[in-house]
Amino acid sequence: MPAAGALVVYRAVFAALGCLMVGTLVYTCITDGSPFRAELLTPWMMTTLVDFYVNIAAISTWVVYKEGNWISSIFWVVLLVCFGSATTCAYIVSKLFEITSSGLSQNPLDLLLLRQDNLPERKCSFVVIGRTIFSILGILMAALVTYTVITDGLPFRKDLLTPWMAATLIDFYINVFAISVWVVHRESTWISAVIWICLLICFGSITTCGYIVVQLLQVSYQDPVYHLLLNSHSKSENSLKGDMFLVHNNVPSVHKGATIKGIPE
């Protein structure tokens, strides 16, 4: 699909999902009252909320990277915590509308995922911390699901599907969809992408954490951030742009074993 067409589709899809989530929240509030009631906090509802917020933590990490300052980062993270996938969709749509026609020579998802300032200089400096945090979150989520199954039985019961549980699941899976878009873009084959998406649908944030840890294990702290976010083809394009940036600014190349003509090693 041409870049311009893909951009329009992404805008429309995430705008529609955001409107769906807002409509769901308003409808559920009107028909079932406030969600802040103790009787709603069943074991599986609590587990679903933890699952939901682990995915929010992953999305928030990207938002903090994407934003240019801490004030806007905190603003968006607070909205994510309060309004979930409605904020996810609003944030993505706002960033998609910042992509101009002059940038459409590149995949719109590349432009969406990355910060555009000082691209070659930003490194994965928190790789070890990221591996540790998301490993712990994944293990804790797996333990919580196991505990809830043992103490409260399987979640596939009609009595669990209250209006607010249904709204929470819609909220949850819209975020899963957003993460899946990155996974499809990141993976080099459709087979691996489909496998990961199936795991995301079945195991939620356990898979999110597992996928992030797997990707973090493939990069070092010296690698640019786009090595984590983009697929191999996009990484090659950004690597070339990074070298051009370095030449233009008379900065030595950061790639191991590479030199730039006219610049001493």
Image (cartoon, rainbow, N blue to C red):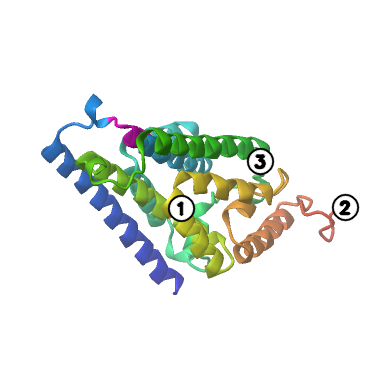
Specify few, some or many for label 3: CA neighbours under 10 Å numbering under 14, 14-19, or 20 or more.
many
Label 3's element?
helix
User: Which residue has dot 1 on it?
Assistant: 200
Q: Which residue lies furthest to the left in this view?
A: 31
Which of the marked residues, 3 or 1, is nearer the chain's N terminus? Answer: 3
Q: Where is residue 240 in the image (x, y as percent from the top left)?
A: 68, 63
User: Which residue has dot 2 on it?
Assistant: 264
Q: Where is residue 191 in the image (x, y as percent from the top left)?
A: 54, 68
At 42% from the left and 36% from the top, the residue drawn is 150
Q: Are marks 2 and 3 in contact (CB under 8 Å)?
A: no
Q: Where is residue 259 in the image (x, y as percent from the top left)?
A: 83, 58
Relative to 34, residue 190 above or below: below
Q: Is residue 53 visible?
A: no
Q: In which quarter of the image is residue 5?
A: bottom left
Real-space Cα separation, disc 2 to disc 3, in angstroms: 30 Å
Badge 3 amino acid: Val
User: Which residue has dot 3 on it?
Assistant: 127
Specify few, some or many for label 2: CA neighbours under 10 Å numbering under 14, 14-19, or 20 or more.
few
> Going by the image, does 236 lie left or right of 155?
right
Badge 1 amino acid: Leu
Which of the marked residues, 2 or 3, is nearer the chain's N terminus? Answer: 3
Label 1's element?
helix
Dominant secondary structure, magenta: helix
Q: Can residue 54 be seen in this view?
A: yes
Instruction: Please state the extent of the stretch shown in magenta in the rendering.
Output: 41-46
Which of the marked residues, 1 or 2, is nearer the chain's N terminus? Answer: 1
